Image (spheres, rainbow, N blue to C red):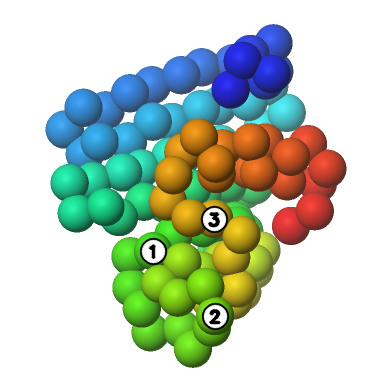
Amino acid sequence: MKECASEIKDIHLDDDRPLLTLAFLNGLTVYIRFNDYQEYSYQVVFSLKPNDRIRFDNFDARWSIDSQPHHFHPRCKENGIQSPMKGDPNYDIPILIKIIRQGKY
C-alpha cells in the first residue's frame, strides 16, 4: 500500500476482528479482512447506498464459478462472479490497488 500512502486520509487496524480500514482522500473506504480460517475479504465502499461497493472474498462457496471459493461481487450487484484473487495478500493487494487506481469496478 506504499504506492497509495499519499492518497490515504486515515488508517485503522481493529485487532479483534481482524480488520484494516483505509479511508482515502477521494472518499473511498477500503476494508481488508483476514481470519484464522483462511477467509479474506477486500471491500471498496463508494457510498452508503446499498451495494455501492465492490468485494472480493472466499467466505462462501455457493457461486458456480471456476475460481470458487474465491469470488467477486461487482458494484451494485449481489451475485458472485469469477475473481482474480487467491487469498494471498502479496498477490492480491497489487491487483486491488490497480483496480482502485484504474476505476474499473
Q: Is residue 20 above or below residue 83?
A: above
Q: Residue 21: horizontal and vertical position, in percent?
A: 43, 31
Residue occupying the point 52% across, 73% down = 67
Q: Identify the disc placed on residue 18.
A: none
Residue 59 or 8: which is nearer the viewer? 59
What SS does tag 2 mark?
loop
* Residue projecting furthest to the bottom: 64
Residue 3 in the image: x percent, y percent? Answer: 69, 18
Image quadrant in which the C terminus is located:
bottom right
Q: Look at 16% across and 33% down and name the residue there.
A: 16
- Hey, which quadrant is residue 26 in on the image? top right
Q: Is residue 62 visible?
A: yes
Look at label 3 and name its amino acid.
Answer: Met
Q: Quadrant of residue 77?
A: bottom right
Query: Left of 104 or right of it: where is 19?
Result: left
Q: What is the distance, in whole Å, between disc 3 and disc 1 at their CAs? A: 9 Å
Q: Which residue is mark 2?
A: 66
**Residues at circles 3 and 2 in contact by the CB criterion of under 8 Å:** no
Residue underneath mark 1: 58
Please count the marks in the image. Answer: 3
Q: Residue flagged by tag 2: what amino acid is it?
A: Asp
Q: Earlier in the sequence, mark 3 or mark 1?
A: 1
Occupied quadrant, residue 83: bottom right
